[in-house]
Amino acid sequence: MTVTVTTTGFAALDTRMKSLSNDIATKVGQSANRAGAVVIQKKIKEGVPIGPHAEGSIRNRTRKSGKVVQEKHTKIINNVKVRKVRAEAGRVVNAIVVGKDAYHASFVEFGSIHNAPNPFFRTGFALASEDAVDQVKKVLARRLDKAGV
């Protein structure tokens, strides 16, 4: 699946961002990035399938060894989050992640030997990409105007 987004105005944005101090420019960029990530997060949550089991209910799982263990059931929708993560070269970026408690999200997204794939994450990302870019643009404009550039 390929997502294509067309944007313009990077030269003007670059000029405005360079007129700010490093700290302020970083905060402006991170807040705009997070705002775009939240738009995508909401769209992903709209497409998450909701199973019949209640959040927190106890489920029996059989391990490969045959051992039966009890664990609390978690909903995927409650574990789709926007987090700051370290990228290459020490940069910090906002990422949309599924928390470790909803480990079964990958089985839903990509399918398993027992279930067909239901790509809620990729679909939500593709549907929200244009809206996320628009939100980033709005937040950047608002924050740069507030900074006086």
Image (spheres, rainbow, N blue to C red):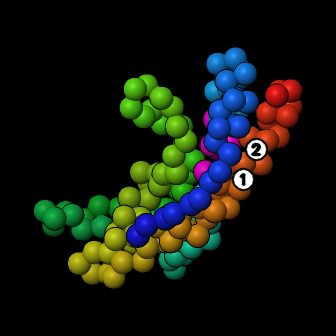
Indicate left or right for 32 with 125 as reference.
right
Residue 33 magenta-drawn? Answer: yes
Mark linked to residue 135: 1
Mark linked to residue 139: 2
Give residue 13's position: percent from left, percent from top: 69, 37
Q: Find residue 80 and report its image quarter.
A: bottom right
The 10 Å Cα crowd at callout 2, few under 14, some 14 to 19, many 20 or more, is many
Q: Do callouts 1 and 2 mark residues in contact (Cβ within 8 Å)?
A: yes
Residue 99 showing in the rendered view: yes
Question: In terms of depth relative to the viewer, which is nearer, 63 or 16?
Answer: 16
What secondary structure characterizes most of the magenta part?
helix
Question: In terms of depth relative to the viewer, which is nearer, 131 or 73?
Answer: 131
Identify the amino acid type marked 1: Gln
Q: Residue at x 43, y 25 (%)?
A: 90
Q: Residue at x 69, y 29 (%)?
A: 15
Q: Quadrant of the C terminus?
A: top right
Give the spatial CA distance, label 1 vs label 2: 6 Å
The magenta region covers 30-37
Whether 119 is drawn above or below 36: the answer is: below
Whether 32 is drawn above or below 116: the answer is: above
